[in-house]
Image (cartoon, rainbow, N blue to C red):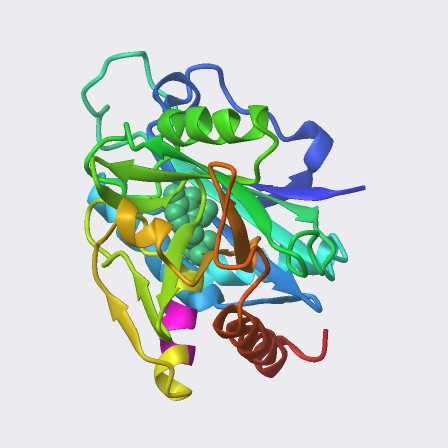
Amino acid sequence: MTFAILNGDLVNRAEAKVDIEDRGYVFGDGVYEVIRVYNGKMFTGKEHLERFERSSANIGIHLPYGAEQITGMLEELVEKNNLQLGIIYMQVTRGVAPRVHAFPDQNVTPALTAFTREMPRPLAGLANGVKTILTEDIRWLRCDIKSLNLLGNILAKQKAAEQGCYEAIQHRGQDVTEGSSSNIFIVKNGIVTTHQSDNLILKGITKDVILQLCSANNIPVEEQTFTLDELAAADEVFLSSTTSEVMPIVKLDGKKVGNGAPGPVTRKLQELFVAEVENQCGTL
Ligand code: PLP
């Protein structure tokens, strides 16, 4: 039997049911996190919990449990499901209430749910890189909130999938923002650049790990907006996310990045990333 968390209780996954008037279901009124599990341990769990609290606070959801309590529940879930390599998906919605846009009464309890999924590694793509497309970023202006509302992201990812590509790189006019479910980095003359963490992108936990790894290993790095022209002229491009780690990008809209193979800075960051995972979670 696989377990899930439903409002603080560990329940049989097959029997974890939510109400059809849950505001997450009706409005997408909630926020979520995806946490990677290596060797049965959460990687950067603290950072994910902090972002979960921040996202919730940003939309006025008062989490029914503290970060430590949620962490304890997630650890128990991982153990009960005997999850070694995989992910935890966790979300909180504003709860169950008659369908009215404005927030319901204070006495409606936010609904917290979580489940796990196995996800082996290494991922396909890490060795040889992936193909991407470019697409206008049509999302709202609070992309820093990890909202359940993912329509813009879904439509972008679907466009990529229909063209046999792994990811859609979004841009607002000339400025590159982020992938549909990842952050984007370019490397030019040895300097790593990625969009600053503001309201236009999600402040990726993996992005932050990469920024720290760059600083600790004397790899020049800057957080600053870059343009489509700079993307096209980059020596290397890669994306990052909890599930994709440090993923080389070798094609942009059918055009090769550099010589069409993952570059040396990307490779170095992949190595450093794995070392950091092993440092926190044990040998992979
Ligand atoms: N940007 C978006 C839009 C995402 O959905 C994600 C992750 O799913 C990321 C960036 C990467 O964030 P993280 O590294 O925390 O997984």
Residue 253: x, y in percent?
Answer: 47, 36
Does the segment drawn in magenta span residue 144? no
Q: Between residues 172 and 212, which one lies in front from this camera angle?
A: 172
Q: Between residues 167 and 235, which one lies in front from this camera angle?
A: 235
Does the segment drawn in magenta span residue 212? yes
Q: Between residues 32 and 279, which one lies in front from this camera angle?
A: 279
Q: Residue at x 32, y 56 (%)?
A: 203
- Apparent side of residue 3 relative to residue 226 in the rendered image (left or right): right
Residue 266: x, y in percent?
Answer: 51, 68
Task: Find the residue positioned furthest to the top.
Answer: 99
Q: Residue at x 39, y 24 (%)?
A: 151
Q: Residue at x 69, y 66 (%)?
A: 40
Residue 153: x, y in percent?
Answer: 40, 32
| Main secondary-structure element of the magenta-colored stretch | helix
| Quadrant placement of the C terminus | bottom right
- Which quadrant of the structure image shows residue 56? top left
Q: Residue at x 39, y 53 (%)?
A: 184
Total of numbered circles in the picture?
Answer: 0
Q: Between residues 81 and 89, which one lies in front from this camera angle?
A: 89
The magenta segment is: 208-213
Residue 179: x, y in percent?
Answer: 41, 43
| Quadrant placement of the N terminus | top right
Q: Is residue 73 visible?
A: no
